[in-house]
């Protein structure tokens, strides 16, 4: 993350060819077919058991023993994830206030009788003017109603049409994301067999007992 495209591509292709150790964001490894990964180490929490399970699944695809390790500070990483949930799924009132500001701004710069208007402004600039804490999430939400369309970096085409918007739907998504994160925290804190917990979580009743391989079973 944060590297130039050429640097990132060189590192990724080098790792895919020669292996070794690479430090990367959680998106790294998607679509890479390297079967002999022996370790996946997380620094901090993921947002859910689904994310964690998908990411550790990049190790041991050749059927050989592999290790998944998570290093975390419970209080610090808990607060980070709750902050991220707030940014990606803000409450409906914040989105509603942002949309009111964005539409008013678009109407102010629109030509006569226009049904859309261009807002040429970065998300950081919009956050400063609108006082919204979750501009990116709000824009993504509004795109779902075809009210905003990205036309380039810092270029947004805004519809001036009035629509009924279910701002409360974001609150439902927020509650679900918090529930998923709480399930992950409980998973990490549990002393039960990891495989058993995962099977129960995904509704697989084919496993019973202890796997004899996870950290809780080995203790």
Image (cartoon, grey):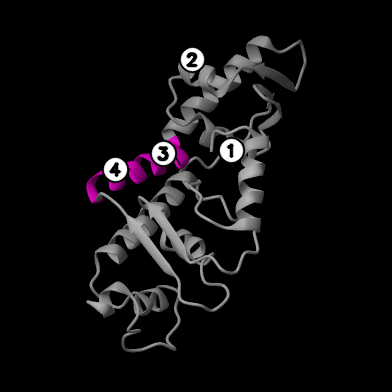
Residue bearing mark 2: 129
Q: Which of marks 3 and 1 is in front?
A: 1
Q: Where is residue 144 in the image (x, y as percent from the top left)?
A: 63, 42
Residue bearing mark 4: 79
Inspect this view and state whether residue 73 appears.
yes
Residue bearing mark 3: 91
User: Between disc 3 and disc 1, whose residue precedes?
Assistant: 3
Q: Nearer the viewer, mark 1 or mark 4?
A: 4
Q: Position of residue 202 (x, y in %)?
A: 45, 74
Element at label 3: loop
Which disc number belongs to residue 140? 1
Within 10 Å of disc 1 (Cα), the crowding (few <14, some 14-19, many 20+) is some
Q: How far apart are marks 1 and 4 (CA)?
A: 24 Å
User: Between disc 4 and disc 2, whose residue precedes?
Assistant: 4
Magenta stretch: give its range: 74-92
Residue 115 magenta-drawn?
no
Element at label 4: helix
Q: Distance between the residues labelled 3 and 2?
A: 19 Å
Q: Is residue 45 left or right of residue 65?
A: left
């Amino acid at each position: 993350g944060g590297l130039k495209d050429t640097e990132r591509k060189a590192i990724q292709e080098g790792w895919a060819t020669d292996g070794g150790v690479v430090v990367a964001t959680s998106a790294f490894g998607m679509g890479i077919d390297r079967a002999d990964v022996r370790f996946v180490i997380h620094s901090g929490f993921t947002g859910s058991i689904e994310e964690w399970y998908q990411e550790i699944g990049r190790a041991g695809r050749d059927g050989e023993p592999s290790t998944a390790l998570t290093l975390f500070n419970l209080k610090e990483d808990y607060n980070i994830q709750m902050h991220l949930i707030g940014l990606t799924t803000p409450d409906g009132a914040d989105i509603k206030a942002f949309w009111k500001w964005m539409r008013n701004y678009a109407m102010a710069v629109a030509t006569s009788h226009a049904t859309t208007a261009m807002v040429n402004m970065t998300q950081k600039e919009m956050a400063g003017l609108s006082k919204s804490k979750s501009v990116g999430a709000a824009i993504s939400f509004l795109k779902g109603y075809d009210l905003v369309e990205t036309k380039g970096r810092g270029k947004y085409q805004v519809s001036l049409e009035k629509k009924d918007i279910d701002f409360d739907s974001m609150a439902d998504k927020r509650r679900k994301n918090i529930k998923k994160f709480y399930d992950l925290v409980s998973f990490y804190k549990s002393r039960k067999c990891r495989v058993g917990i995962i099977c129960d979580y995904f509704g697989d009743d084919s496993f019973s007992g202890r796997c004899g391989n996870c950290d809780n079973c080995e203790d």
